[in-house]
Image (cartoon, rainbow, N blue to C red):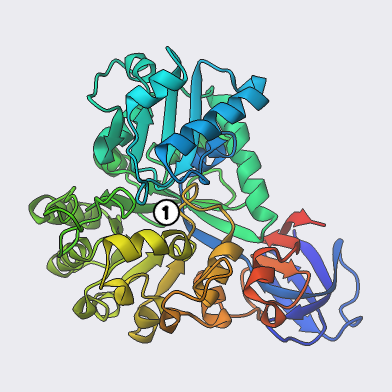
Amino acid sequence: MDDLLLRRVRPGLGGDLADVRVNDGRVTSVTEPGSAGFAARVVDGHGGTLLPGLVDAHVHLVQWATSRRRIPLDAARSAGEAIELLLAHLLATPAAQTELVVGAGFRDGLWPDKPHKDLLQRALPGRAVALFSADLHTLWLSPAALKLIGRDHPTGVLLEGDCMTATAQLPTAAIDVQDRWVAEAVAAAAARGVTQIADYEYADTVADWTRRGAPAARISCVIAKHLLDQTIERGHRTGDVLPDSDGLLTVGPFKLFVDGSLNTRTAYCHDPYPGGDSPGSLELPPDELIPLLQRAFDHGLIPAVHAIGDRANTIALDAFEEVGCPGRIEHAQLLAPADIPRFAALGVIASVQPAHQPDDRDVADRHWHGRTSRAFPYRSLLESGARLEFGSDAPVAPLDPWDGIASAVARTDDDRPPWHPEQALSLADALAASSGGRRGVAVGDVADLMVTAADPSVLSPADLRTLPVTATILGGHVTHQV
């Protein structure tokens, strides 16, 4: 039986000092300091702020755990610079001299040159090199890496479905090593106040998490498209608690892709990208999307549809309306004005990643020129009545909800002015979107909680990004404490 006492905490933004008791995984009392008596375990909050635990609604956990060990290429401003960063890292880190050299985080949407397998061959003759874009929709391979997976390709730059298939074919660490890395990544997330994660890994997440055992956060095991029939045969439905998991593992939504991404210029739009006649890539047309949504919903699986471009979002919303089921749209980065109120009307959650907005502002200004007033439109969605849920899409952005919260509030992450500040959210709204909709701590609440060292409401956005979390509680159990 849980018996936890949080002493000297301040429940809610601007809250008064109190003692908070937790029993059997729920908050059972909020009293004046010193009046709550004794408990089996006591955590001293030192006057910090007690808030609901944070939820990251979109993570690729194996890729995030692995990317923490990949060569970082996010600073590259050209294909040439990416190779320079790669070579510098290999020179400085002999341990990186493995069979497969792996880098990650490049954004080529504004590069003056183009990635190509020949560039990697000249820089590292005969070496197998795999470089992942920040959005995970592009994979840049050397000739030796292509040979490693039994492929040939004219440029070595694979997009969308080809990228994901090739990614699955690349050599990976042993399963026990991956599991250890994932456990470390979830523990690091708990240290930032995270108590729940939706794992969108393109794999059998149910089997993987059943094998891994109890994590330091609640995990929603998202179902990949190719596992729909298997999931139905297992009898799994969205929200089901998996056995022998202490209630921490649940079956998540069913994931589908309608389009690509902005940086890869494959997000499917109503208007073509500058300099050409391509509007992006339609990965799943309506005549395929609608039957998949219907089949999933008929078997108790809630769809989660990846849609970034405005035309992709229109198609996704039309499909939800046709089927008549609730669901989620993942990303919703560019929306037609008429589509914004449809999220609330159709009961479709807008699952968005606010850290992407400052990361992508420059590429959006170039490739979505004249349309950015409706890009990353969080305030418009919220005011229309839509439910917002925040995620990171890690490793596209770090698994740290404070980064997303600060980006949603400030609409910038550097010294530049806010980008479309009319779409900024209040801190209270951003915290709610990062906490599964919870807006405070009250008696009867599930004890998924965190204690921050300072009151977030008195901090600048820059300070929000580095706000220390002094304790994280998952169902009444402490998963992190300073």
Give the side of residue 286 with respect to residue 15, left or right.
left
Residue 131 can be seen in this image: yes
Residue 133: x %, y % from top left: 41, 42
Looking at the rendered structure, the kind of residue marked 1 is: Asp
Q: Quadrant of residue 138?
A: top left
Q: Quadrant of the N terminus?
A: bottom right
Give the side of residue 55 with respect to residue 114, left or right.
right
Q: Quadrant of the C terminus?
A: bottom right
Residue 121: x %, y % from top left: 39, 19
The residue positioned 35% from the left and 84% from the top of the image is: 385
The residue positioned 51% from the left and 15% from the top of the image is: 99
User: Farthest left residue?
Assistant: 287
Residue 308: x %, y % from top left: 29, 60
Q: Name the secondary structure under disc 1.
A: loop
In this rendering, is residue 213 above or below 260? above
Between 28 and 332, the residue placed more toward the observer is 332
* Residue identifier under label 1: 240
Q: Quadrant of residue 307?
A: bottom left
Give the side of residue 150 with respect to residue 314, left or right.
right
